[in-house]
Amino acid sequence: MANLTKCPKCKANIESDSWFCDQCGSELFICPECKIFGKGKRCTQCGTELVKASSMASSHIVTTPSATIRPATSAPQQPGHLVCTNPPIRLGLESGVIIGRRGHYPTVFAAFGDISGNHAKIELNGQQWQVTDLGSTNGTFLNGESLTPNQPYPIKVGDILRFSTLDFKVEI
């Protein structure tokens, strides 16, 4: 999970990679030098002009949480990431990850209103990774097939998972 910091406006704890406060909805501004959130026009630490937090990110690349999975040489390679090319998103996997606007990656999915708050769950069951649609409004698909809600389906490297309109390839 991302580190927590305080919203400069409402003082709520928020993830340090947020672009907006998930409590008060305020757009966040950050000092490009000190890397701390602030309000107003200038950093209270160094005086540098604050910029939108969204301008500090080159893309929606997220690597936390991430599971370091090193398969045995004779075993098939295990999933470690979900990768979307349009828009560029890379999500690290660990068992129990919730995909959605209120899940483990709220800042990534905040702009996608068609993704449910708790859209799908990805978990490791023994040696098998699986995806479960959590009753999402716009559906979860595995290699083009619609998933029955609340039913786990096995996934492997190379599979394509679609959450509403976003396609993710399962990668190492």
Image (tube, helix red, strand yellow):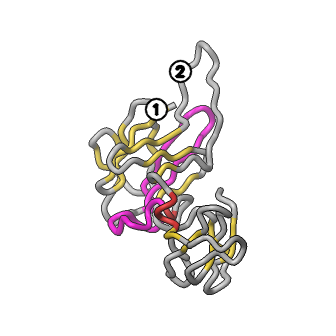
The answer to if 109 sits in the magenta stretch is: yes
Q: Nearer the viewer, residue 28 or 70?
A: 28
Side of 26 relative to 72 (left or right): left
Give the residue type that dot 2 points to. Pro
Count of numbered circles in the view: 2
Q: Secondary structure at mark 1?
A: loop
22 lies above or below 137 = below
Say whether residue 141 is visible: no
Mark 1–mark 2 distance (CA, rounded to whole Å)? 9 Å
> Residue 1: image x %, image y %?
65, 56
Side of 140 relative to 47 (left or right): left
**Splitting the image into 4 quarters, where does residue 138 fall?**
bottom left
> Residue 23: image x %, image y %?
57, 81
Q: Residues within 10 Å of mark 2 (few under 14, many from 20)?
A: few
- Residue under label 2, please give it: 76
N-terminal label among 1 and 2? 2
Toward the right, the furthest residue is 45
Residue at 47 percent across and 33 percent down: it is 171
- Residue under label 1, please give it: 156
> Residue 148: image x %, image y %?
36, 53
The answer to if 113 sits in the magenta stretch is: yes
First to last magenta residue range: 108-134
> Residue 160: image x %, image y %?
35, 39
Q: Nearer the viewer, residue 168 or 14?
A: 14
Toward the top, the furthest residue is 74
Give the residue type that dot 1 points to. Lys
